[in-house]
Structure formats: C-alpha cells, structure tokens
Amino acid sequence: MTAQEVRLCGLLLREHFGEVVEKVGTQLLRSGAQNLRTIIHETGLSVDLVKKSLMVLVQHGACLFSSGRKGPGSPTEYRSGCDRILRILRYPRYIYTAKTLYGDTGELIIEELLQRGHMTMSGTVKTVADRLTQNMEEGRSMDYSEVSSAFSKLVETHFLQRCPPLAGAGTADSTNPAPGATPATPSTPSAPPTPESFPDCYKVPHMTLVGRGKRQLTAEDGEDQRNAKRQKMDPEAHGDEGIYWQVNFERFHLHFRDQAIISAVANKLDQTSSEIVRTMLRMSEVTTSPAATCTKPLSANEIFRSLPASYNIPRPILDQYLTLLVDDPMEFVGKAGESGGGMYVVNLHRALANLARATLESVVQERFGSRSARIFRLLLRKRHLEQKQVEDFAMIPAKEAKDMLYTLLSQNLVQLQEIPKTPDYAPSRTFYLYTVNQLPTARMLLQNCYKTVANLIERRLFESKESKRLLEKSQRIEAILASLQASGAEPEQLTEVEEMITAPEKQQLDGLRLHINKLDSAENQVDETIFLLESYVNSTATSTS
Amino acid sequence: MAGKGRGVAAFTFNIEALGIGRGSMPEARVGPSPLFPSTDFKPVPLKAGEDEDYMLALKQEMRGTMQQLPHNIKPQSNKSEVERYTERYLKKSQIEDEDWTPDWNLFPKELMPQTKKPRAKAGTKKKPVKISRKETEAMLSKLDALAKNDDRNPEKSDDETEKKPGNEEEEEVEAEEYDEEDIEEENDYIDSYFDNGEDFAADSDDNMDGEATY
C-alpha cells in the first residue's frame, strides 16, 4: 500500500463515490483493519455518513468486514485493499471487451454490475432490458429471455461469478449450500474465502422471469408512472433472492493477457503465427489454471484440427510455423515433447516477463534516447558489466557512455554492484559492475505509472474547476435547448438560445473539452501499461511462493 | 590526506580506476532540482482510434452516471436559503427514483441505521438510509422545487420502516444500545468494560481519578 497507490485510490473514490467515501476509504487504506468507532473518530465525520460510506464500499467489494481479532464478541473490523479500487481505472476496458465478445447486451450487463457493485440476476435482467428497450425504435421491446441467455453465457465463461456468502459477522443463513467454511472464520482472521471456493460459484439459479423490457416515457410524465410501476414490481419474487452476482475481474485479466500475447506475436512474426497462438490459447482456456506458468501441452495434431476453417494451411507449413515460434527469442511457445507430432506449450509467465521487459526498454528509449536504450538492453542481456565493457559492447564513445550510464544510475534504472578483491572494500581494489534487475525496476515503473494517473486526474479536476462557471452555463443551455426541442419550438427560438453562448466562450469550451478528453484518454492508456506490469509482478510473486 | 592543493577535491582512492578524470566532475548543485525540468525527448502522442474513442466515451459516461447514483454520497453542505436557478436544472438530472435498498443479509448489523429511538441530532437519523439523497437536500434547503417527491417517498419509506423493525427488533435494539452508549460517552472506554454494575458517571470522585490520568 504505497503512498502513490493510496493517493490514486483516494482520487478514484472521490470521482466515483464522492468526497465522504474518499475520506473513509483513505482512512481504511492507510491504517489497516479498524472497527467502526475508530473510523468515526479518525475521520471526524458523523456516524450516519460513515455508516453509509462503509456500506457503499462493501457493496462494491472494496471493503471487507470480519469479526474482530479479539474473538466473536468484539466489534467487526473493516479492511480495504488497494487492488479492488484500482480496478475502477479499468472499467471502460472491461465493458468494451464484453461488447466485443457478447454484443450490446453483454456490454450493458457488465456496465450495470460494475456500477452497482453486485446485483441479483433478475434485477440485472430487468434493468438491462429496460435500457435496451429505450434505445430501440418505437413499438419494439427487448425480451427478458434474451437478456437472461446473455447473462447465462457470461456466467458459463466465468466472466460473472456469485458473490461469496457472508462469512462470520452475523448473518443467520447463507443462501448457498456452502461447505461449512463460513462458521469457522472468526478464529482465523486470515484471507477471506475467495468466491471460487464455493461450489455454486458459477451456477445460474433457476429463475422465473418472463416479460419484456419497459419503455421509459419522457422524464416529466414518466416519473409518476415509473414510481408507481416500481412499487408494483418490487414485491414480486423471482426465485433467486439473496444470490448476488459480481464481475469476475480475474477472468477478464486472463483474457487481456491472452490478447497481449497474441498481438505481440502478430507484431513480431505475422498474422498466421498469431492465429496459431490464439488457437492454442483458446484450446487451453478451460484446462489452464489462472496462476499456471504455461498451458497444458497440446499436440500438433490437435492444433491442426482446431485451427479456424478460414486458415487452411497445410500440415507441413503448420509444423514450420511451430518450429519458428519455438526458436524465436521471445520464447512465447515452447516444445514439451515429441509425441503426437510434437507437444507444444505457451509459456505464459515467460511471455509476461518478456512483455514487461519490452515495456521497460521502450520507457528508457523514450525518456533517454536510443543509445541509452542500447546500453539498457545490453545490461539486461549481459547481466553484469564493467564500465569499460559497456563502452566496448555498446560501441559508444567513452565520454558519452559514461554520461548516459550515470543518468540511468541517478534515475535508479541501473544499479551498481561492488565486488571486492580485499575484505576492506578499498575502492581501488574493488570491481564496480553495472547491472539491471528487471523485477525491482518493473515495480518502480509501476509506482511511477500510479503517480502518473493520479497527476492526470488531478490536472483534469483542476481544469474543470477553473472553468466551472462556463461548464455550468453550457449545461444549463443544453437543458433549456432539450426541453424546448421536446416541446416543439421554432428554429428561431433555438438559435436564440444557442447564441447565449458567445463565440470566445465556445472556443474556450472546445479547448477545455479537448484537454479533458486528452487527459481521460491518457489515463486509459497508462492503465494498459499498468496492467502489463502488474501481471508481470504478480506472476513472479506466485511462482516464487 | 591533503590533496595536491587547497580547494581541490581529494579522494581516498585512485579515481582513474573508475574511468573519471578530475575534470569531468558534474557541477555542484546550487539548489533543489527544478519542479518541471525540460526534457530532451518529447513524449509519444496518444493512440487514437475507434477503440480508444469508444473507451473514452464509456469512461466519461460511467463517471457521470456514478456521480448521480445514490452510491455517491455528498457531504451535507450548507445550502444557501435561495436555491440558485442552475441547481434546479442540475438537480432534475439526478436519478431520483432509485432508492437504494441494500440487502441487509450482506452487511454487518451495526451498519444498519437506527430507526427506533429519536435522536437529538438532525432528523436524518430517524429515517433509514433508504431515502434517496433528494430527501436530505430537501430538508436542508428550504425552497424545494421538488416537494412532490417528499409526498411520495415518506409514504413508501414509512411502509418499509414498519416492516423492518418488526422483523429484527431484538438484535437491532442490542446493536443500537451498544452504539449509543459508545458514542454518547465520547471516550475510549466501552461501557461494558467496567461491568461493576454501577453507573459510570455517578461515582464521580473515585472513578474520575482513574480516568483522567493520561
């Protein structure tokens, strides 16, 4: 929980949940597990607000609670982790992926679940059907069963999972027939059970829900009707009460990782090789565990049979491609045996490490120039080199090589390793070797990325605050325009209203929009780097433990 | 050990071994490094394409929506007496009919709002958290253009209020008392810690010494 992470989490909470939740959230992040009284005391907010904020955080999975450390009688403790809150940065990417895989329905389902934290299946289906009906033309509406089937598909491919039933702190019944793990938690305040430890995690409940989406009428008149309808609809039970669903981020991350590998192969080699790797990954989707180092071995025969029909390459060509992939220094694909025409695996962890290494190299190149990047790559490959050797291998004149090395050293991208000849570490009798450690450097760059995103968000908030008056004015004018248009006004009235914004103000507004869009877009793209580096760091953590 | 002359830096080791000559030392620092140093290399432009534009739109939409959901908790600001014209249009865009009714099975009991005992503080304490943010704002600002919401919501919340306490009366009373005593005492001792059966505040002199020494 570094300072940069906490700062970024605070900003994300502020943007999406308000300042009150930000205060409570950062208090939890900074000080670990606390009970309700401590939080109230430290943040200085009223009891009511703190309770509501905690509920919002728990609803969205950002905060976990458990019975206190002193035993079952002590007050519940709340703890929060940075990871879940940092995922908020990636929400657009999740929604877009769902759209590409499952169309508009899938996109809206994921969007609703991300906005609400967790929901029941029936609630989600109804809301999504209503929204889809909104956008369809008059007279058509979306059937609930279509949305339900999309939902089931998402659950089958593990993109959605059930929320784990409440563990410990005070409920009477858990709706899942979970294996007795729940009552035993008070004594072990260790990691809460993951959603996957419950057997019904991916089971779609039997739900009685028939009907079609309801079209929402215009805002003014529809209010009364909507409220009346909601009061009527609420008492209906659909047979899946108490079963809540949440988005399974890990599954999305696996999907992103596969995408990154495939596009890297496509960039380095060619389209056909990337199709082969895509086929291999698709075949191993269900058999590979999330933390696996490499996929299960696949024989060349199987790969040949599973290639998509549009790629009818002959068998010997496929073998050649596979050999090429194995020989490539990137080591995405490895050979694991000779049976069945050759057994091949995709080396997942090594691929991640190579992708992270490429990221580091490109960072050095963009910040310090291509010659410094050459030195950096040299040190990555040769591990330890002396000053003189660096100059020779990199073929850079001594003075400049020295300068570059010292710049890299001052930025902490390169480290100095001392090897003494005598026990007293006398400088004249010690070897000084330059080296690059990939993992610590990756961590450092990851923290830089968090800091970058936090700076981008702050700058965006600053820009909006500067032009707050102008933004409000334009919002008001848009609202007036919309209401005028809805009630059918003449074009002269519309132009008159539009002219309320003067030309220089319009220019200012356009400039402001451009800046804000740029900053937002930059956040999205830094998040892609964050994803790569995080996956790499996490993969090394699991493989060494 | 003194160097060749005064004022020349003297090193304890042979500096040529590191490959640096005496003349190539960097200048001494004159102050803190600049806040925005000039960079030799400008950053690469952002990726621009359909995907990126779509994700940008998604991000801005999501931010806007989440700021209007009842999850977004606004601090109770002191509204001015006169409601500004701007705010009337902005308030209309709030998602009003979305009262957030969480499933209490998933939350610890102590987070439930206290619905039974009337508190001396603001009237918001009496009403359950299910009331949308509009209620709180309505109470704070005298001029309420959306008074009609007031008429509808109290009816509904009254119904649900009566149902809930009926079901979970006992546990709720215990949770309430526990919380109330803690908060009203305004010190770090939980009342039940001293279970001597006597009222804590009544025994003034003897117990006060134990309490005040720190």
Image: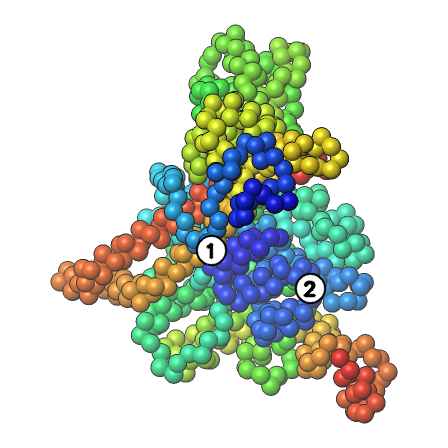
Pick the front one: A83 or A462: A462
Q: Position of residue A449 (x, y in %)?
A: 50, 46
Query: Furthest residue to the left?
Result: A492
Kindly tell me whether residue A346 is visible in this rendering: yes
Asked which quadrant contains residue A525, the reply is top left
Q: Which mark is residue B31?
A: 1
Q: Position of residue A92 (x, y in %)?
A: 46, 46
Q: What residue is pinned by disc 2? A: A34
Q: Residue at x 49, y 19 (%)?
A: A273
Q: Residue at x 61, y 28 (%)?
A: A384
| Marked residue chain, label 2 | A
Mark nearest the camera among 2 and 1 is 1
| Marked residue chain, label 1 | B
**Badge 1: how crowded within 10 Å, few (<14), some, or many (20+)?**
few
Residue type (three-letter) at the residue carrying disc 2: Gln
* Quarter occupied by the C terminus of chain A: top right
Q: Are marks 2 and 1 in contact (CB under 8 Å)?
A: no
Kindly tell me whether residue A353 is visible in this rendering: no
Pick the front one: A403 or A522: A403
Alpha carbon separation for disc pair 2 and 1: 43 Å
Q: Which mark is residue B110?
A: none
Q: Position of residue A48 (x, y in %)?
A: 59, 73
Q: Residue at x 48, y 51 (%)?
A: B29
Residue type (three-letter) at the residue carrying disc 1: Gly
Asked which quadrant contains residue B81, the reply is bottom left
Q: Residue at x 45, y 26 (%)?
A: A397
Q: Is residue A356 above or below residue A468?
A: above
Both labels 2 and 1 in a single chain? no
Side (left or right) of A218 relative to A95: left
Q: Position of residue B137 (x, y in %)?
A: 45, 75
SS state under label 2: strand
